[in-house]
Each structure stands twice: as C-alpha cells, then as structure tokens.
Image: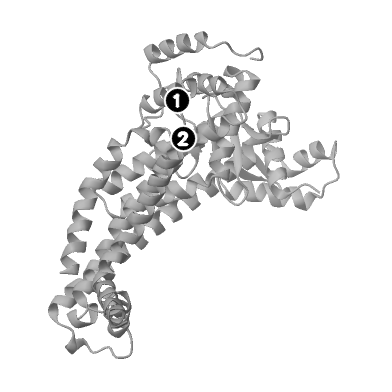
Amino acid sequence: MIAVVLAVYAAAGTALLPRLLGWARWRDHAPRLAISLWLAACGSVILAAIFAAIAAAAPSHRIGHGLTGLARAALALLGNRFDPAAIPVRAWFAIGAAGLILAALAQGLGGVLYVTWRERRRHAEMLAVVGRHDHRIGATVLDYGEPMAYCLPGRRPKTVITTAALRSLVPDHVAAVLAHERAHLRGRHHLLLAVAQGLARAFPGLPLFTRAGSEIARLVELRADDVAARRHPRVHIAAAVVSLATGRAPAFALGAGGENALVRVSRMLNPATPLRLREKLIGVAAVAVLLTGPAIIAASPGLMGAVMHHCYTLAFF
Amino acid sequence: MPTLGELESTIMDRLWSYRRPASVRDVLEDLRGDREIAYTTVMTVMDKLHKKGLLKRHPQGKAYIYETVLSKEAYTAGQMRETLARSENQAATLVHFLERLTPEESAALEAALQVFPPRGRS
C-alpha cells in the first residue's frame, strides 16, 4: 500500500511538479528560492521512488514499524541474514528498481563531473598560455574577437573577459559584468549546474529533470545579477547584458535564445518588490515538505502506531 | 622564480612574435635579456609545449628547431570554439555570460536604457 502511494507520487511528480513550479510567478523575483525548490522537487521524486522500491521489497509486517522497520528490513536484505531464497520474486524486482535508480544517478552525476573536470583543465591550460592577468580589473584578459565574459570554476577559479568585451564596454560596465561572474564563483553555481545536468542525464526524458536542468541554468544567471546589483547600479548590469548579447557572431550555435537576456534586462531596470517574509517562509516550508514528505509517507504506519500507543497510555491516566 | 605555467606563456609569446622557427638557444638569449634562466629549463618547457601540441619541431644539427603550430589567434579561436561547442550541453564547464539578442530586441533595449539616466558616472 505504502509502496503504491510512493510510486504514484513519484510518477505523478515527474510530470506535475515541473508544471507547478513553472506556474510560480515569483520564481524570477527569488531565484535562489526557486533553485532550492527545483532541486528539492528532484530529490523528493528520487527519494519517493527509492522508498517505494524498499517498501515493496520489505515484508509487509516489518514495514508496519515504519522507518526503523524499513531500515531493518533493508539491512536484513543486505546484511548477513541475507537469504536469497527467502526473498519473494516481487521483492527482487523492487530491489532491482532501487538499484537501477541509484546506478543511473551515480552514472549521470559522475559522467557530468568527469567531463566538466576534463574540459575545465583543458581550458585552464589554454588560459595559462594565452591569457594574461590584469591586476587593475582583477581578471584574466583573453585576446579574442568575440565579446565575452565568463568564469572558470576550479581549485584556482578564474574570471575571464575578452579583449573584444573590454573594447565594447565602458569601465563601469566591465566592473558590473565581473561582479556577476564572481557571484557565480562565490555562489558555487557550477556545482548547482553540474547536479542539475547530472540529474537530467541520469533520467532522460522525464520532464521534471529536463526542466530542472534548463531552469536552474537560467536562474543562476538571475541570481548572479542580483548579487552583482548589491554593489553596482542595476542599469550598468542591464547595459552590459545588452551590449554583450548584441552583435554576437552566429559562429556559436548556442541553444539558449535571447529570452533570458530580455528577462534579465527588464529585471534589472524594473526591480520587483522582494518577497515578503510570509512568502519566503512558505517557500522554505515547501522545500522541507518536498524533501521529508517521502520519508514521512514511508514511515506513516509506524507513526500512526506510535500515536495510537500514546493515546492508549494517555487513556490510562 | 616564475612558475612553469608563466614560462610556457612567455615562451609561446616570444615564438609567436618571431613569426619564424627558433632554437632553444635563440629563445634563451632572448629571455636572458630580462631574467636569469638556465638552458635546460627553457629546453624542458619547450619540450613540454611540443608534447602539448603547441609547437612542432625538426632536428637541425644536434638540437631541435621549434615552430608554432598555429598563430596565436587561430589557437585561441580553435580552443574557444571547442569549449563553447561543448558547453552548449555542458554549461558547468564554464559558467558564461552568453546571451543572444536579435538586432530589433537590442535596439528596443538600448532605447529603454536611454530612459534611465546613467547616474553621472558612465
């Protein structure tokens, strides 16, 4: 029963959660909260699927004791009391399913982390040869004809700006762009992106994970703008976005179109009123519910039992 | 004492500026103009650059004569193109500030920006 509830939740969640989160109008006002919600939604569905598999595998009388029972059942499955003959066929399927989910997760995340690490090292090698550090702006300058600014995360992170960008931006705008890039580095946005992409790669074709990947990539830009806007006039950030996004040679067929540039500019020019405390608390509560919900459902028979037990003791006094 | 990475960059810059092949001795004499440096150090770094595919070489007498494989511009452009082509699916490699606007969009935005006074400084 519990297994069915969790499995239905996981299946429905992959289809419905992205729509629910896509509807949220405030998401561009509070990008950090929106990122947390997307990641929590992904975590929630994965946890529910794994719990569902474990609940289906464990003997039903053990599940009755809730999470401790679940953990004990899982240990019994893995531990020295392991007896393949005693496990019903149904349970083998469930264990296989949980194993597949974990394997896909490991493969997706591991693959992304490895590829990124290799690419970053290559790029850092190139920067070591052709880049030069400019102490005045505190960034690596790359002699290159395309106006660009980016950051290279890693053990020795680098903020990079091309000579073409330096030519097309006035110093104030350069400072704003570099603040945006440093916000990416300080916020560890590359890790968020790696997780989002790893999930999308682990579970291809599931709307929740593909949407989470593209949304998080978009939201980190908004977040970095907000951080940069603490120290720099918002209009400078907007102007820099426009001039870096204009006249880009089509040599790089980047998937993202101009929509995000438009959103970013209008956000910078017309700052929205920040979320009220109540709205923030609702958001944080939603993250908590998403992450703990599956565990609570998995443990619910045990909780019910505990409540009943306490009711009895209370009734005695 | 400069790091090896810095030396790689300096030596590549020298070789790019010569626009002709050069031996380790040539580079060494050029570098000695502004720093104290050993022949073996320069030789090691140039050998490393050869292994990395940045320099090609052919023997001349007892030593090698080195030459850059690509011009500086071509090398940078090639590397950037490669990185950017990959980062289309791999935004985590470098988090970049790449947005694209059509000429109409950017004209509209430029107009919008004009409305906002640049607050004295810009």
- Chain ID of residue with mark 1: A
Depth check, front residue: A76 or A309: A309
**Measured from the top left, where is residue A214 in percent x and y?**
35, 40
Residue B21 shows in this picture = no
* Mark 2 Cα shell of 10 Å, populated few (<14), some (14-19), many (≥20): many
The image quarter containing residue A49 is bottom left
Q: Which residue is mark 2?
A: A221
Side (left or right) of A267 relative to A17: right
* Residue under the point 61% across and 26% down: A232
Say what amino acid the circle numbered 2 marks.
Answer: Glu
SS class, disc 2: helix
Quadrant occupied by the C terminus of chain A: bottom left
Q: Which residue is mark 1?
A: A267
SS class, disc 1: helix
Mark 2 vs mark 1: give the one in front.
Answer: 1
Say what amino acid the circle numbered 1 marks.
Answer: Arg
**Measured from the top left, where is residue A45 in percent x and y?**
28, 57
Same chain for labels 2 and 1? Say yes or no.
yes
A192, above or below A53, in the image: above
Which coloring applies here? one colour
Side (left or right) of A203 relative to A175: left
**Measured from the top left, where is residue A55 in percent x and y?**
22, 73
